[in-house]
Amino acid sequence: NAGVTQTPKFQVLKTGQSMTLQCAQDMNHEYMSWYRQDPGMGLRLIHYSVGAGITDQGEVPNGYNVSRSTTEDFPLRLLSAAPSQTSVYFCASSSTLLPGQGQPQHFGDGTRLSIL
Amino acid sequence: KQEVTQIPAALSVPEGENLVLNCSFTDSAIYNLQWFRQDPGKGLTSLLLIQSSQREQTSGRLNASLDKSSGRSTLYIAASQPGDSATYLCAVRKVIGGAQKLVFGQGTRLTINP
């Protein structure tokens, strides 16, 4: 069982370039999200999705776009990379959002992104 | 705004000791609290999930407690081993802006010395 798979694991970009970080899960989870992890800042939510065709902004959405065309995939797009976007990016998924029935979040291994 | 704090930021203990990691949160209106482990260069592995109606959860040598009224959770690790060395993160799940979201603490970096 693969769980949450992120690709690539490492990437170096130049300022102004664009790229897409891929995230796929095989657990049929409705809820998927993207976080960035920075030293001293912890994990911060970028965007999330509660199901196919539904996305919304998290805490730090600027400079990132997402889409959710299928239940399995939730790609994160950097439109014009900036050095401030150098970070480790994690994708996560979980099932059901019913109040009081929160299920564990499952995380991918991360994408380490450097913007020069 | 919900804030989650973990103290201490780093902890080093000899092998075999029992230890407690702390997590505090400012808003008690949470759905659940989850403890994660993160190894260097790796993603987060879920350890324990405590629903808002529960007081504690146990898994092997790990025991997590939750006191919503005081905004605190503890992760107890019994008979620590070098393999327990990692960063431990707690996160609360609550409604923010009409949607359920996780808010993370910054973690406690644990080192178990052989």
Image (cartoon, rainbow, N blue to C red):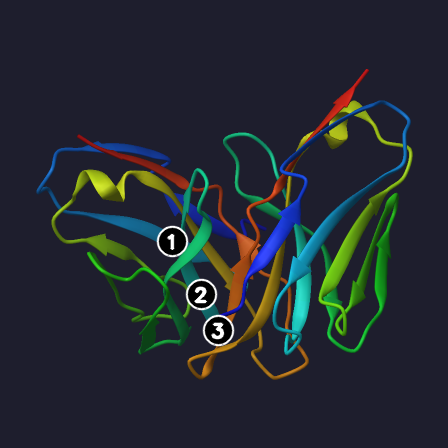
Q: Quickly name the residue at label 2.
A: A32
Q: Residue at x 86, y 23 (%)?
A: B15
Residues at discs 1 and 2 both on one chain: yes
Q: Residue at x 62, y 84 (%)?
A: A99
Q: Chain of mark 1?
A: A
* Mark 1 touches mark 2? (CB < 8 Å): yes
How far is disc 1 from disc 2 in space, using C-alphas?
9 Å
Q: Nearer the viewer, residue A2 or A109?
A: A109
Q: Chain of mark 2?
A: A
How far is disc 2 from disc 3 in space, using C-alphas?
7 Å
Q: Quickly name the residue at label 1.
A: A23
Q: Which mark is residue A12?
A: none
Secondary element under disc 3, as helix, strand or loop, is loop
Amino acid type, mark 1: Cys
Residues at discs 1 and 3 both on one chain: yes
On the image, which quarter does residue B4 sit in? bottom right
In the rendered image, the residue lying farthest to the left is: A16
Secondary element under disc 2, as helix, strand or loop, is strand
| Residue B25 image position (x, y, % from top left) | 64, 63
| Residue B72 image position (x, y, % from top left) | 74, 61
Secondary element under disc 1, as helix, strand or loop, is strand
**Depicted B9 relative to depicted A79: above or below:** above
Q: Residue at x 27, y 67 (%)?
A: A67
Residues at discs 2 and 3 both on one chain: yes
Label 1 vs 2, first from the N-terminus: 1
Q: Which mark is residue A30?
A: 3
